[in-house]
Amino acid sequence: PYTTLFRSGRHPIQDGWEPEFYSTTQPHLQSPSPNIAQLRSKLFTDNALPPCDLLYVLVNLYFNNINTWCPILHRKTILDLLFGPSALDEADRILLHAIVATTLRFSTDQRLTEESRRHYHDISKQKVLLYGLENSSVKALQALVILTVDLVGSSNGPPGRNLLTLITRSVVQLGLAVEAASFSVLPSSPTIYTLGAMILPEPENWIEEESRKRLFWMVYLLDRYTTIATAFEFALDEREIDRTLPCRDYLWNENQNIQTKWFPKSERATYDLGQPENLGTFSYYIEILGILSRIHRFLKRPVDISALTDVEKWQGEYRELECMLTSWKFNLPEDYGNMAQLFQPGGITAINCGWVMLHGKREKLLTSNPSLLTF
């Protein structure tokens, strides 16, 4: 549904998605009024970018149409950065190019002909790619992720997957896959293990810290989305992940420093930091993708249906995954967890693909060996 809606350009709130994460009904934020003369001086009349007044419109279109799907940029921070009094450095300009490349499709400005749209899109895309290959930073990675969302949503094959391979390794190498307090960064015993070494400077504030967290989880989401329907392995290994979940959007927008629970993984004994009300749709979405990842690996493993031990092992893992799905559903807040709506006329139309995949595998196995019907 993600790829189909994004490719069609329809607004997801019209298609039955939960409003908080996928709509633009966020708290009103004051934006700096664009000073065209100031913008021109900041951009040095860059011919690779659209006119300054159109740039301001495109950035707002980005937050209305793309950041709702890819919530990695803090609206007020980015508007102040791009349209405030401070000069733009190269990384800021690359981030602006990523926004332009992915947002041109939403603009109805009369000045944008098909030729000019293609011109601005191609130039911005190439600048983001070249900068991302030569530089390793949070802003460079943000620009690449925004461009990857566009490529994954409008293509099917190497363009998106090649770029996704690059960003999945980058988030790990930059240390974004783990918290600063992670046991992989601060082991309880001496070790030569250095995967979790933090090479980025400390975030200046909590908004920047949450931005980094959301950047990582968006890469995780893209990796799962592009792999689930294939026979490939995930590019981002969950053994490299030790992160807390992102908070609700309005808490981030209002700069309310809070804690959320850890993403479940076998090496961690406790996950229950923070309060449930601090979690939003993005967090629950990541949790179900984690279960879906296990189902994907489960479906890939061959089963010898003539070997009793193989079948019993398969049955045990099947029951475990079924319990995980049931437990996740049971622990959802009331506004998320009413699954009965799936089967009511006019109710939600999207059925959880985790249950479909898991039970589809069961039916296939039973069809191939009717003697297992007692399971």
Image (spheres, rainbow, N blue to C red):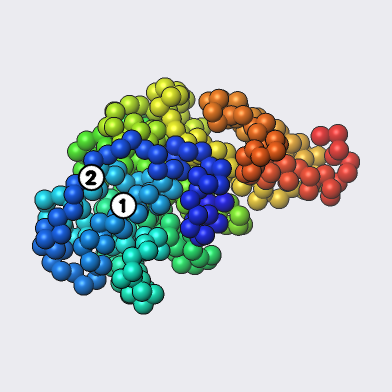
Is residue 141 or residue 111 the one in the foreground? 111
Q: Which residue is mark 1?
A: 60
Residue 126 seen: no
Say which residue appears at 60% left-offset and 57% top-offset: 230
Residue 31's disc number: 2
**111 w.r.t. 337: above or below:** below
Is residue 172 or residue 217 the one in the foreground? 217
Say which residue appears at 37% left-offset and 49% top-offset: 64
**121 w.r.t. 323: above or below:** below
Q: Picture quarter containing residue 143? A: bottom left
Q: What amino acid is labelled 1 in the image?
A: Asn
Q: Picture quarter containing residue 101? A: bottom left
Say which residue appears at 73% left-offset and 46% top-offset: 361
Residue 353 seen: yes
Instruction: Give neighbour class at mark 1: few <14, some 14-19, many 20+ (Cα, 10 Å).
Output: some
**What SS does tag 2 mark?**
loop
Say which residue appears at 40% left-offset and 43% top-offset: 24
Query: Mark 2 and 1 residues: CB-CB less than 8 Å, in contact?
Result: yes
Instruction: Give neighbour class at mark 2: few <14, some 14-19, many 20+ (Cα, 10 Å).
Output: some
Q: What amino acid is labelled 2 in the image?
A: Ser
